[in-house]
Image (cartoon, helix red, strand yellow):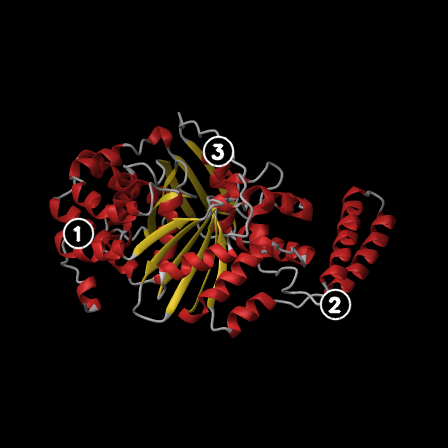
């Protein structure tokens, strides 16, 4: 079938159902005896396979006082193994113990002279350790074999590792990926600490929007770990030790917490055979289950204002259910109605007509959607306008949706947009790998992704009105930047 047929904007649920059914028939899954889950989707249009390792651990799972450890671990997972990334692992390992001991002494001392001496010793040992390192050897192996897109992300909910290979490199991926999580070596630990601290400086401490979102999360969540930044607090990052990362890895990077998704020109039977050889080596274990108390619903409005030498910015947010909840899709549709393109309500009213906003966007599932989260509206006032004017414009549009059901043609437009989004995802190996993992782990199974087609069709104007009415002022959190003169 030609791609334009997939993307035609007049496609109805009935006309695209065959494409959805065909996609579902291309998916298979299996579990190894150790609990590791594999999802395989055959897409034979090009000789490429996209790989995703999804680890069911994120910022919410971190111990108090060790925020950022999941993200730190993600960085270190690219540093190699006992065979990759080193000239002499036995000798290199000895320097790790020396560096860790000196770091502990530096953390304990309050004597300036002793501290300076320890820093000199630390630098000397670090230079010795550096001589054993073959920097970025893991990445070089991937690149030399034709791999592209090698990267990873850490979120509040999960950690994802991904890249794509030519189809004939399936076994190489099995070998590399299984080895780096079977026997990882967290080398260059202290250099990476400085990299992460600099990342925090750039994205949060020196970024007005970064400061605003960190303050917002700490205000809107009182108990749930969604309140903490995924990158971690500065003091926690500085104090993290190698043993903290190793313990976190041992507790959470266990087979039953790992989902491997392969999408592309692949034979499921070959995947299962090779998976048993390479990933079947992982010992069966039960990963740590994080006990997370639910966030109490807000009973009164919350707000925080930052005065910064920056353009004004505005956030308002309301409670939103988790991905697994049947009403989550309705919140997605509400976000689309509010800000999905130039014909959406907020964009048309505030950006095009009233010109009170430079931009305005509604999001669902912030900062994650494994647990109940926030429905968020974010925007920047246009020059000469205030955050109060932006807030008033948003309130007017929300009140209109709460007072009257949306028109049938407006709802039909949004349904078409969501159907087309689902079809477009089918054309992306990388995008499908991510979505299959998300729905498999955080939803009701990967099938929920495709069942959205029927769920979209069943949503009525009354459903949208009811969801809009759930955005109650007494449960609203407002965070904003006022320009400091």
First reached walking from the N terminus: tag 3 or tag 2: 2
Judged left or right of residue 483, residue 352 is left
- Camera-side residue: 360 or 15? 15
The quarter of the rendered structure image containing the N terminus is bottom left
Q: CA distance from mark 1 to mark 2?
A: 61 Å
Query: Marks 1 and 2: CB-CB under 8 Å?
Result: no
First reached walking from the N terminus: tag 3 or tag 1: 3
Q: Residue at x 71, y 61 (%)?
A: 89
Q: Residue at x 12, y 48 (%)?
A: 409
Return the x and y of residue 448 as percentages of the image width and height. Answer: 29, 45
Is residue 383 visible to us here?
A: no
Q: Residue at x 52, y 69 (%)?
A: 142
Q: Which residue is mark 1?
A: 413
Is residue 217 visible to us here?
A: yes
Task: Characterize the local packing of mark 3: few (<14), some (14-19) or many (20 or more) Cα atoms within 10 angstroms.
Answer: some
Element type at mark 2: helix
Q: Would you place residue 250 above or below residue 175 in this image?
A: above
First reached walking from the N terminus: tag 1 or tag 2: 2
Which of pointers 1 and 2 indicates the residue nearer the eye?
A: 2
Judged left or right of residue 306, residue 348 is left
Return the x and y of residue 439 as percentages of the image width and height. Answer: 35, 46
Q: Residue at x 36, y 58 (%)?
A: 431
The image quadrant that residue 399 belongs to is top left
Residue 236 marker: none
Element type at mark 3: loop
Q: CA distance from mark 3 to mark 1?
A: 36 Å
Q: CA distance from mark 3 to mark 2?
A: 44 Å
Return the x and y of residue 373 as percentages of the image width and height. Answer: 40, 38
Q: Which residue is mark 3?
A: 224
């Amino acid at each position: 079938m030609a791609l334009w047929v997939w993307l035609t904007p007049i496609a109805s649920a009935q006309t695209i159902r065959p494409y959805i059914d065909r996609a579902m028939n291309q998916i298979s899954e299996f579990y190894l005896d150790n609990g590791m889950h594999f999802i395989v989707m055959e897409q034979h249009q090009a000789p490429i396979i996209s790989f995703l390792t999804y680890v069911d651990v994120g910022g919410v799972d971190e111990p108090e006082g060790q925020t950022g450890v999941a993200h730190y671990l993600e960085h270190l997972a690219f540093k190699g193994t006992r065979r990759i990334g080193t000239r002499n692992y036995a000798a290199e390992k000895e320097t790790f113990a020396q560096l860790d001991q000196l770091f502990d002494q530096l953390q304990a001392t309050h004597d300036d002279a002793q501290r300076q001496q320890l820093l000199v010793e630390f630098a000397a040992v670090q230079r010795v350790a550096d001589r054993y390192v073959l920097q970025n050897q893991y990445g070089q192996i991937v690149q030399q074999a034709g791999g592209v897109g090698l990267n990873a992300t850490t979120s509040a909910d999960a950690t994802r590792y991904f890249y794509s290979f030519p189809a004939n490199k399936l076994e190489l991926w099995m070998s590399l990926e299984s080895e780096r999580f079977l026997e990882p070596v967290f080398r260059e630990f202290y250099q990476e600490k400085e990299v992460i601290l600099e990342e925090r400086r750039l994205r949060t401490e020196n970024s007005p929007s970064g400061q605003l979102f960190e303050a917002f999360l700490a205000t809107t969540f009182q108990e749930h770990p969604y309140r903490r930044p995924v990158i971690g607090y500065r003091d926690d990052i500085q104090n993290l030790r190698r043993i903290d990362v190793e313990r976190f890895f041992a507790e959470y990077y266990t087979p039953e917490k790992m989902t491997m998704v392969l999408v592309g020109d692949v034979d499921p039977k070959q995947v299962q055979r090779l998976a048993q050889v390479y990933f079947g080596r992982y010992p069966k274990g039960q990963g740590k289950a994080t006990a997370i108390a639910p966030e109490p619903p807000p009973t009164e409005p919350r707000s925080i204002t930052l005065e910064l030498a920056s353009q004004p910015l505005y956030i308002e947010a309301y409670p939103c259910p988790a991905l697994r909840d049947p009403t989550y899709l309705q919140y997605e549709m509400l976000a689309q109605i509010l800000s999905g393109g130039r014909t959406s309500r907020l964009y048309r009213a505030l950006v095009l007509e009233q010109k009170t906003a430079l931009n305005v966007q509604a999001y669902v599932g912030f900062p994650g959607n494994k647990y109940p989260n926030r429905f968020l509206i974010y925007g920047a006032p246009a020059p000469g306008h205030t955050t109060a004017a932006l807030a008033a414009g948003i309130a007017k549009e929300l009140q209109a949706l709460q007072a009257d059901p949306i028109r049938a043609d407006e709802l039909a437009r949004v349904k078409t947009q969501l159907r087309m989004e689902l079809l477009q995802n089918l054309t992306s190996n990388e995008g499908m790998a991510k979505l299959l993992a998300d729905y498999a782990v955080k939803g009701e199974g990967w099938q929920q992704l495709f069942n959205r087609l029927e769920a979209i069709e069943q949503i009525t104007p009354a459903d949208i009105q009811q969801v809009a009415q759930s955005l109650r002022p007494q449960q609203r959190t407002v965070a904003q930047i006022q320009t400091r003169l």
